[in-house]
Amino acid sequence: MDLPLVINPDDYLETEFGREFTPERNRQAWQLAYARLRHELSQAAKGTHVYVVMGVQGAGKSRWVAENLERLGHGAIVFDAALPARRHREELLSIAREYAVPVIGILVSAPLELALSRNAQRNADKKVPEDALKSVFSMLEPPSEDEGFVWVQTIEQQAPLPTTLQTDRMTLVAPDVALAEKLADALNASYALHRRFLVWSKPHWTREDTQESLQRAAKDFDAPVGEKRYFLLSRDEPQALVGCIGLLPLADEIHSYEVGYWGNQAHAGHGLMREALTALVSQLSGHTLRLTTSSANISSQRLAEATGFEWVETLQGARRCEYFGVRDTLVYRRTAR
């Protein structure tokens, strides 16, 4: 099967010694890329179409092209370049109009932090200066059909969730059955606190109970719609499990999570949950986070506000528990940044 042709101006910067960039070489590279596009369109067969894959450097454009090349079809020509603003796309769209070839716009979108991180991992000759990358990011304008595209799509890129995370006093880890004994100890030590607000709490957890729970949690962590639970381990000796934070993907909003947490009562009052939650949400700047708590749970409300969540709604009489009776549910939100 013939794969689609991919035109990328950066390819014209390549030399036997790697990619060499100067303003003059860059201008020539774009001229050569547009000349190649004209040549291909001038002899294109019926049914040819152009995909313009655009976005800030480090967003994942070339990766998206490589992963989707076969399904785009042999009649496709792919133009892979930043082209952040409408004015940057005018020449390409003008060339396509000359040959009456339809153009599809694909914006590969990523948070600035992710683009910078990926760019920093590139080989030195392919690394974009940070100021230049930030400038391109600031110019981003989503493509629209009124520019001349027959169809547009935005592909959202997000950094994968970490499996471990270090803070000054803790390590956050993904579920592991090896934690079964520590988890049982933490839950059994905290029943008096948990029974007030957590419907799943119970007076006693056996090691077998927590092994089963951790096995399910490990499967969920790798599942796209499963809850991602992080267990908080103290960094001192003997190491203790001091709490848990869960991220449940929300079905009604892309790249968003419902946040839940519980703490080990034996380690309460030392700011450990605040430290852990602050560290975790800082890794999720591209995600919208939601958190709910009881109107009776003052500590949880303070924690939400201290870690950047804002109260957005009160659900009157939405929860009932044996300890407090009927209470309101407070809804907090931390928007993607």
Image (cartoon, rainbow, N blue to C red):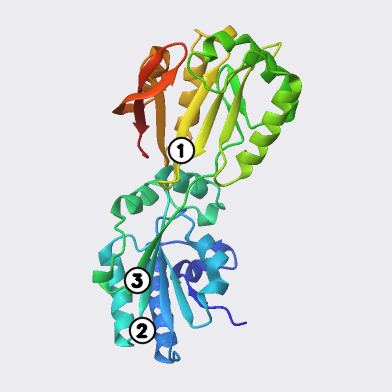
Residue highlighted by disc 3: 151
Residue highlighted by disc 2: 101
Q: Nearer the viewer, mark 3 or mark 1?
A: 1
**Depth check: 31 or 321 in front?**
321
> CA gap, disc 2 to disc 3?
13 Å
Above or below, 1 against 325 in this view is below
**Depth check: 323 or 166 in front?**
323
Residue 68 screen position, x and y as percent: 54, 67
> CA gap, disc 2 to disc 1?
41 Å
Image quarter where the N terminus lies is bottom right
Mark 1 falls on what kind of element?
Answer: strand
Q: Nearer the viewer, mark 2 or mark 3?
A: 3
Residue 157 screen position, x and y as percent: 47, 52
Q: What kind of residue is marked 1?
A: Tyr
Mark 2 falls on what kind of element?
Answer: loop
Residue 279 screen position, x and y as percent: 49, 27
Residue 259 screen position, x and y as percent: 47, 31
Above or below, 271 against 101 in this view is above
Q: Are marks 3 and 1 in contact (CB under 8 Å)?
A: no
Mark 3 falls on what kind of element?
Answer: strand
**Depth check: 221 or 4 in front?**
221
Is residue 309 shown left or right of residue 114? Answer: left
Residue 100: quadrant of the picture: bottom left
Residue 185: quadrant of the picture: top right
Residue highlighted by disc 1: 257
Q: Are marks 2 and 1 in contact (CB under 8 Å)?
A: no
Is residue 177 shown left or right of residue 329? Answer: right
Q: What kind of residue is marked 3?
A: Trp
Quick one: label 2 or label 3, which is nearer the N terminus? 2
Quick one: label 2 or label 1, which is nearer the N terminus? 2
Q: Residue at x 55, y 40 (%)?
A: 161
Q: What kind of residue is marked 2?
A: Val
